[in-house]
Amino acid sequence: MSLTETRYCFLVDWFDNHAQLTRQYEFFFYPLDSTIEMYDSKQRRTFLKRTKYTVRLQDLFIGAAINVHSRQLIIRDYGDEYSRSQLVNQMESTLLLIKPDGYANIGKIIDMALQNQFSICRSRMLKIPPYLAQELLGNDTDIATAADSFTGGLSVAIELLKPNAVQDMIQLSGPPIVADAKNSDPKCIRARFGSLGHKNAVHVPTNSTEAKQQLDLIFGSGAHNFPRTATFKNSTLAIIRPHAIVQGKTGNIISMIQDAGFNITDMELYHLDRSNAEDFLEVYKGVVPEYHLMLNQLTSGPIIAMEITGDETITTTFREFVGPVDPELAKQVRPNSLRAKFGIDKVCNAVHCTDLPEDGTLESQFFFQIMQS
């Protein structure tokens, strides 16, 4: 099939809040001109005529959530054998686990992955219990020593997607022992951010079978057994908005937060549906003119929510660091703020942060407690 004829088909679900039922559609993507089309197979009619839309092929994978005209669609399966055979072989998932000794460089490690064309599918912060460290290490000959590098602090697990993801991440990470990494590939992750021996900043699977097993261990049905790391004390909330994630700014934003001395004590990637986004933004309804545009932006793609902790002034201090809502104003009065660096306009201003000190813990609880139930 030539490029001019290429069309990928996916089965997608949309939950209709008004009818309280899940509707199913066929979703078509044409890579030549980045157009999409939707067909209602139950009603046997076109639901959305072929139209240009901002979506990338790497955003389309099983389990992904995409936003089309304010409707959040969940990709359930491939819609035909051609799409399955082409994309299953084309895209691969792997695990990148940033270990406690890599915590100070979460943003820089993520940015290295993004600069190497990996896409983030899922991500969450957790504390690795000893039994999980042993399962991840498998048949490692020095399992006792290596396992110690997984425990005792905060880790970030990330599912990454790209063609040949497993082998590419092995190469990007470098040899498991830090000294070997520094000698053979000084630009790799472990050479740059590892400290000594097995304290090598990251863990990655060694083959595709391991990758599937380890992703399931962390993100599968047992994921709820890992306690949240949020403290809900002297905390505030930061959200990396969808436009900034799509533009590949996730690592840079997290790096700026960490380099400024703020503590990230929990984080997770979410796909907010409209109902959850409305609940979260309720305080802005009828108050902020851009409310509906803010709602559309927050549901237009993945977000990364983070609990930021510090002293009792954390909400005010972090809000000043994020900068004014309008990036143009931020560039003038706080040129080194997050919104001055990464914002576009009042709606696409890169980062949401808690406005009022009394709401800091409440907003953290929304994502790391209420959204978990």
Image (spheres, rainbow, N blue to C red):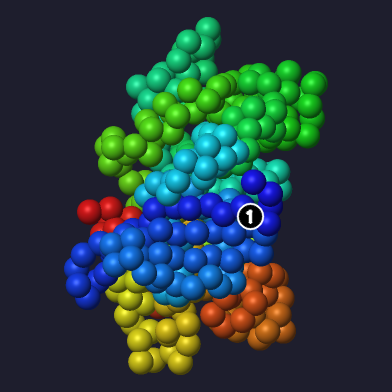
Q: Is residue 226 left or right of residue 324?
A: left
Residue depicted at x 49% and y 73%: 49
Q: Is residue 113 left or right of residue 17?
A: right
Q: Position of residue 315 (x, y in %)?
A: 45, 70
Residue assigned mark 1:
5
**Residue 324 percent location from the top left of the image:** 58, 81
Residue that protrudes farthest toward the left in the picture: 20
Residue at the spot 42% in from the left edge and 26% down from the top edge: 213
Closer to us: 197 or 247: 247
**Which secondary structure lies at badge 1?**
helix
Name, please, the residue furthest toward the top: 141
Is residue 304 visible in the rendered image? The answer is: yes
Q: Amino acid at mark 1?
A: Glu
* Quarter of the rendering containing residue 24: bottom left
Total numbered labels placed on residues in the image: 1
Vertical side of 230 occupied by 203: above or below: above
| Residue toward you, 6 or 67 | 6
**Which is nearer the eye, 329 or 372?**
372
Q: Look at the image and tell me in which quarter the C terminus lies.
A: bottom left
> Which x, y percent locates residue 259?
64, 54
Q: Which residue shows up at 36% across the image and 77% down it?
A: 281
Judge whether residue 313 can be spotted in this image.
Answer: no
Circle 1 Cα neighbour tier, 10 Å, few/some/many (<14 / 14–19 / ≥20): few
Residue 68 versus residue 113 in the image, above or below: below
The residue lying at 50 percent from left, 59 percent from top is 28
* Vertical relation: 191 (above or below) 366: above
Q: x%, y% of residue 127?
A: 40, 37
Quarter assignment of residue 214: top left
Residue 14 vs 197, above or below: the answer is below
